[in-house]
């Protein structure tokens, strides 16, 4: 059997970060054979410059929006950004397809092995069905009112059927400001014991909408022909208004959380533990900076022992789709967070969140988590196997 040996300045095994005293041994397919001390191996090659790591797990992406690369300018603010996404989706199908192919190739080559990917359409089915990346498809439902719920849900189920093939696929709510109460109730039933995601508290206007029925989201609703909020006023924050709809054993990925208060973090964690659901907090730091030029207070999530993972969001809101660059930005914005912790978010935690821990996330014997070499300054990364 042919073996491959990997050694670099540092090695992260999914749990711990080592100096160059460790050598990773795989077979020709990338299956992990062993992790050994360099002094125990004969004819050791010089260490490569960088950090060896299991393949990245990107827990939030919108591959189907790849054609919007460099289309929407940075720092528009969330509401104007959403309006632009709605108005700029109608590109020629050939352009959309080529952009998806280019993005999938980039994601693969930079060392990402699994992706939690949002889909409103089946545009990505052609590439996912032959991709070497493992996809968790989140078919994102938008349904502002109950009027056409069954018709709309039927359309989204059709999208899911086209995507499912060899990749797990679930119906999920887009965001609190786009899902009617009855739709939330139905999605709770349809997602029993499944992994779902929802965009959470990306802008202060989200809380304002549920507390008062007013605010900046009314501008978005007007694009869909609504002059006022279609949602009940709860006098509570967004997350306290919608999370109680879920009580069916789901793993819920809360995405972005840019304006989530510490009080809401405590409340959400308590709700989850009391109602047998699992919360995962996904951060897409470069997208936060691209849209709002603001980052969430990660210290509060760490303080309350939150389960944290990383994502890139889409090319409509990011300069690249590489988790290494997300790590680089987290380190710059939050220098007190240990590198080992951030690497766990991008590998082991992500694999656990997407229920792919048996294959990805750690250099464990018998698994095939991929091997990625990350530049020491996190400016780039590349897949080695």
Image (tube, rainbow, N blue to C red):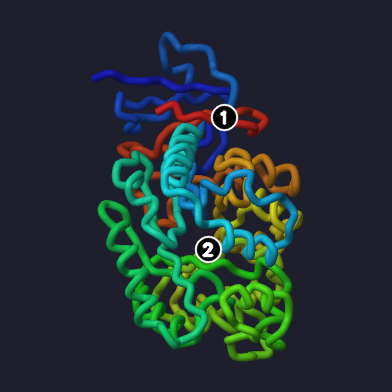
Q: In which quarter of the image is the N terminus?
A: top left
First of labels 1, 2 by sequence position? 1
The numbered disc on residue 280 is 2
Relative vertical location of residue 214 with respect to residue 334 in this rendering, above or below: below
Report which residue position mark 1 lands on: 51
Q: Position of residue 370 (x, y in %)?
A: 40, 35
Secondary element type, mark 2 = strand
> Which residue shows up at 71% across the image and 72% down it?
261
Q: Which of 71 and 286 is in front in this view?
A: 71
> Which residue shows up at 40% across the image and 82% down it?
149
Residue 78 placement, left or right of 133: right
Assess disc 1: are there few (<14), some (14-19) or many (≥20) residues with their C-alpha within 10 Å of its C-alpha.
many
Q: Where is residue 4 in the image (x, y as percent from the top left)?
A: 36, 20
Secondary element type, mark 1 = strand
Whether tag 1 and tag 2 are in contact, CB under 8 A, the answer is no
Q: Which of 282 and 318 is in front in this view?
A: 318
Q: Position of residue 254 (x, y in %)?
A: 55, 66
> Which residue shows up at 27% across the image and 52% down it?
166
Q: Where is residue 187 in the image (x, y as percent from the top left)?
A: 40, 78
> Which residue shows up at 63% across the image and 44% down it?
70
């Amino acid at each position: 059997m042919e073996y491959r040996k990997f050694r670099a300045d540092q090695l992260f095994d999914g749990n711990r970060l080592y100096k160059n005293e460790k050598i990773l041994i795989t077979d020709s397919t990338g299956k992990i054979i062993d992790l050994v001390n360099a002094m125990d191996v004969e004819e050791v090659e010089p260490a490569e410059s960088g950090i060896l790591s299991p393949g990245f797990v990107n827990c939030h992406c919108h591959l189907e929006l790849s054609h919007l690369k460099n289309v929407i300018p940075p720092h528009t603010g969330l509401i104007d950004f959403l309006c632009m996404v709605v108005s700029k989706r109608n590109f020629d199908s050939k352009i959309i397809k080529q952009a998806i192919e280019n993005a999938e190739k980039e994601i693969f080559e930079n060392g990402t092995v699994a992706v939690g990917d949002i889909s409103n359409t089946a545009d990505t089915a052609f590439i996912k069905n032959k991709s070497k990346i493992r996809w968790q498809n989140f078919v994102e439902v938008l349904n502002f009112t109950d009027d056409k719920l069954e018709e709309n849900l039927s359309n989204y189920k059709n999208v899911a059927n086209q995507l499912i093939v060899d990749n797990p696929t679930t119906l999920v709510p887009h965001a609190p400001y786009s899902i009617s109460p009855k739709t939330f109730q139905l999605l709770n039933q349809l997602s029993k014991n499944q992994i779902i995601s929802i965009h959470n508290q990306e802008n202060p206007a989200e809380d304002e909408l549920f507390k008062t029925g007013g605010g900046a989201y009314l501008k978005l609703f007007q694009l869909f022909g609504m002059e006022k909020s279609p949602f009940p006023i709860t006098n509570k924050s967004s997350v306290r208004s919608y999370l109680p709809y879920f009580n069916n054993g789901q793993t819920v990925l809360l995405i972005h959380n840019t304006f989530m208060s510490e009080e809401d973090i405590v409340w959400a964690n308590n709700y989850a533990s009391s109602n047998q659901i699992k919360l995962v907090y996904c951060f897409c730091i470069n997208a936060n900076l691209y849209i709002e030029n603001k980052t969430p207070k990660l210290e509060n999530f760490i303080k309350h022992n939150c389960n944290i993972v990383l994502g890139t969001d889409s090319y409509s809101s990011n300069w690249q789709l590489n988790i290494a660059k997300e790590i680089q930005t987290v380190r710059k914005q939050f220098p007190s967070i240990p590198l080992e912790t951030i690497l766990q978010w991008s590998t082991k935690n992500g694999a656990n969140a997407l229920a792919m821990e048996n294959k990805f996330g750690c250099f464990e014997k018998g698994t095939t988590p991929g091997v990625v070499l990350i530049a020491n300054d996190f400016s780039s990364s590349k897949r080695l196997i």
